[in-house]
Amino acid sequence: MSALDRLPSGRGDRALIAGVACLFVGGLFALTPLQASLPSALYVFVEVGITFVIYGMLVLGLDLQYGHTGLVNFGHVVFFAVGAYATAMLAAQDSFSGIALGYPWPLALLVGVIAAALLGLVVSATSIRLRDDFLAIVTLATAEIFHSIFVNFEGVFGGNVGILGVPRPIAALVGDADTRLIATILVIGGITLITLAAVTRLTDAPYGRVLRAIRADELVTRSVGKSTIVYKTQAFVYGAALAGLAGGLFALYNGAVAPGFFTIQVTVTIWIGMLLGGAANHRAVLAGLAIIMGLRLVSRFGLSVTPVSGDVFAAFRLVVVGLILIAVIRFRPAGIWGDPQELGVDQ
Amino acid sequence: MGLLQEAIFGIVTGSYIAIAAIGFTLIYGIVNMINFAYGEYLTLGAFVGFFAASAIPVPLPVAIVVAMVGGGVISIVLARGFFTPINHTGPVPLLLTSIGLGIAIRNAIRLFGGRSARYIETETTTFRVDAVPDVSIGSVDLLGGFFVTSEHLIVFGSAVAVFLAIHALLTRTDVGIAMRAMGDDESLARVRGIDTQLIRDSVWVLAGVLAGLAGVLMAIQTNVSSTTGFSHILQILSAAILGGAGSPYGAIIGAYVIGLALAISTAFLPSSMTGLSSAVAFAILIAVLLVKPSGIAGTEVREA
Amino acid sequence: MSLLSAEGLVKDFGGLRAIDDLSVSIDEGELVGVMGPNGAGKSTFFNCVSGVIPPDDGTVTLDGTDVTGDPPESLAHRGLVRTFQNTRELETMTVRDNVRLAAPDQPGERTLPALVRSGSMREHEETVRERAEELIETFELDHLADEYSSNLSGGQRKLLELARTLMLDPEVLMLDEPFAGVNPTLTGEIADHIRDLNADGMTVVIIEHELETLTELVDRLIVLRQGRLLVEGEPEAVLEDERVIEAYLGGDAE
């Protein structure tokens, strides 16, 4: 059988095992007196690493939508934000402003996932029939609307300050900062690896074949008897739910949510990561995301050695980010590891 | 402030959105792409006008012309450099490229121009009408006294001039007629011997000129910073889609609907929530795409 | 008894009437050709019957059930499958995946079985693989099985499309210009395949411009003109009909 012959096999099982192992070791750090120590030079790597594994869930969901099914969702951040806000508002004990209900965090996390999935359902029910570029605009506009709602309804969402006082389950268990960081990246990273295993199984199965057929030609896929609307809706909702999970975990790690965490920059970052790595290839999109987030590390170090202000450096980094997006689409439309024939692009 | 006053603000906002929306919708109709970097063309045009008016300095009308020429040049250079080479790849890569280009330009402006807002100083005359009675419903005054400034009149007058010029261009000139033919059916236009690349280039220049004008008018009427264009792009896009993507006349109507909706929502929203008025434009956009995707006058954007 | 029938079909496109009160009936096991000059409404007729576009008026009946306006996917489940005039392969998928995709009732096309890799999914997939390999071999595409279908020639695409539809084991097969752009040797092969399928009991409806092949192949010819039924009957009789000759040589040919 050829490499192209992606049908139920053991692929993704290693990710599952690794994910469970990460969760287990992370759990050991969190629940037992076991301690880890981390050289302070590595702090920044672990912090960016935690953001990476959270964004990893976003990029895997986006790739399910765009890479596999061809749905151009340019408002992915909204599902991340809704998951985060729902979790935060339900779990927060006491916020400076906005709603804080103080429910147990596992319940809050669950509600966060469901809220994001529901929003995904509403968006797809209304917009999934739109042409690609207009779906992109509707999703983008949805994200902007929610962003301004979060900012403007201070009594509910806490305005620009956001929701504070969200419980941090790992921090509550682990006092020492080094162990806490290690436990956090292991637990969230473990969940991301399990996500990777799940989407791999989904797309390697005949299910993924239908998704890729929809991306290739929806009418043909319908004429061989597949209810493409059902699949498009599912792919969209699954992606949204994964983003909601990422958002909930972010809230519980960060201890607070605010509109500044959920700007269009998040959407842009994961899109570039996906396109740079190569859409429709789970590992490639994660690798692409790692590259683009590595750029953040570079700019953090660069900032400390150059005599310019943080604002100038941030602007410069974003110019580079924009140019990378342009260059990838023009010169390597299938990304670094993507298959041009499978993606239907000239390279 | 009375609703009448808000309506005047709405018409002024609608005027520069309309000028920009015509350019945006022409690009959509002829090049078949949603140009998300178009807001940055406005910002660049405004900065060109600002420097002409303050650094050189030249009289205001000259500065406006400089901004328009600058906008046209910037637009065709960017199109040749970034969009024309990937014209064949379809709407999604073009949209994504424009998003990347928008980010790069926006931050380049921030890098060189800083974050501060600038405006072009003009001598302003204000005309007041206070003889209108107040008709209040709750906290909102349905009529009320109002004023119009000379800046308002410049913006509105420019918009009307643009509408007339565009109408003449599209109906009386060969280039304009070819543009319309190409918007209807590109392959048919090619068969009839229309140089489609030449028409695309003309559209890029024209759209850039309009963006430059809209940008400099914003700099006169309010102020501009590196994010001005970006904060207006969804309004411009909403106006264009509301009018029926690809239709310049529809875009004009769409722009005034959006302008008035923004102004009136500002009047009715509590003052702590005026930030929501921009969300109103997007809500209109989504509603239009869902209820009547073809807009007031335009083509189908749903899958067959 | 008629297996597939259309009664009083009407379809307008922006004031232009593409088909006008068209009634056609096809019996089980028939092999029917549909011909007519350009713009006669052949493709619109196919599109209305196969659910690609809903007719403005009239009814479509399949096996005694009213299926007017039913979407293509539900018609496929009822046993009516079609091909397209400009072959539409899933270009970004391999020949194998193109054929396998069409397999009906695969439990692995639902989320849960796919996630848990259920036994029924694996078993079913084994059957799907075997059947797909058979079809790929029958249509002599085995040397191309791992190629992306974008690399196929026009004739090979027609074969692939046929193989893909057969994966569904349809009762009624509607072929839109299966010989267009195909070289004579391959045309003969495709015609043989169609004949075999019909001999095995499959009802086949073909739109075709290639008159010679069509008339040799079919039991009955239906000629459309300006969206209406002009003539129908035995191929020889139809071809000699004055009205048909006029339609093909007259001004309507444009």
Image: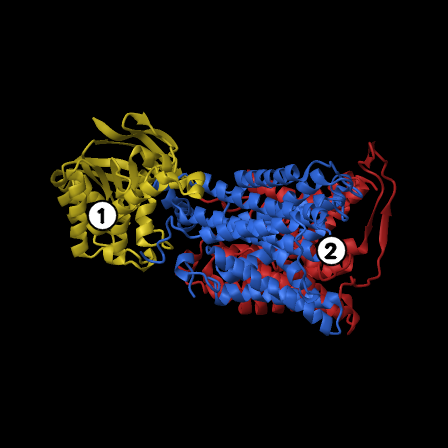
Chain colours: A blue, B red, C yellow
Q: Is residue B80 above or below residue C219?
A: below
Q: Nearer the viewer, residue C251 or A85?
A: A85
Identify the amino acid type marked 2.
Val
Please say whether residue C204 is visible from this viewpoint. yes
Measure the C-alpha gap from mark 1 to mark 2: 72 Å
Q: Is residue A15 above or below residue B53?
A: above
What's the residue at 52%, 65% (across, down)?
A: A328
- B39 vs C252, left or right, is right
Task: From the image, state whether disc 1 or disc 2 is nearer to you.
Answer: 1
Residue B277 appears in the picture as rendered: no
Q: How many marks?
A: 2
- Which residue lies most toward the right here? B130
**Residue for point 23% across, 36% down:** C230
Which residue is label 1 attached to?
C134
- How crowded is the residue under tag 1: few (<14 C-alpha within 10 Å), some, or many (20+)? some
What residue is rendered at 61% in x and 69% in y?
B73
In the displayed structure, A149 sits above or below B197; it is above
What x and y, as percent, mark residue B236? 64, 52
Tell me the residue at 30%/52% (across/down).
Answer: C96
Q: Position of residue C247 (x, y in %)?
A: 22, 43
Amino acid type at circle 1 is Glu
Q: Picture coordinates of residue A179 (x, y %)?
A: 68, 55
Residue placed most toward the observer, C166 or A245: A245
Residue B18 vs residue A284: left or right? right
Residue under pointer 2: B155
* Placement of the N terminus of chain A among the 4 image quadrants: bottom left
Instruction: Please give left or right for residue C108 compared with residue A163 in the image.
Output: left
B275 or B176, which lies in front? B275
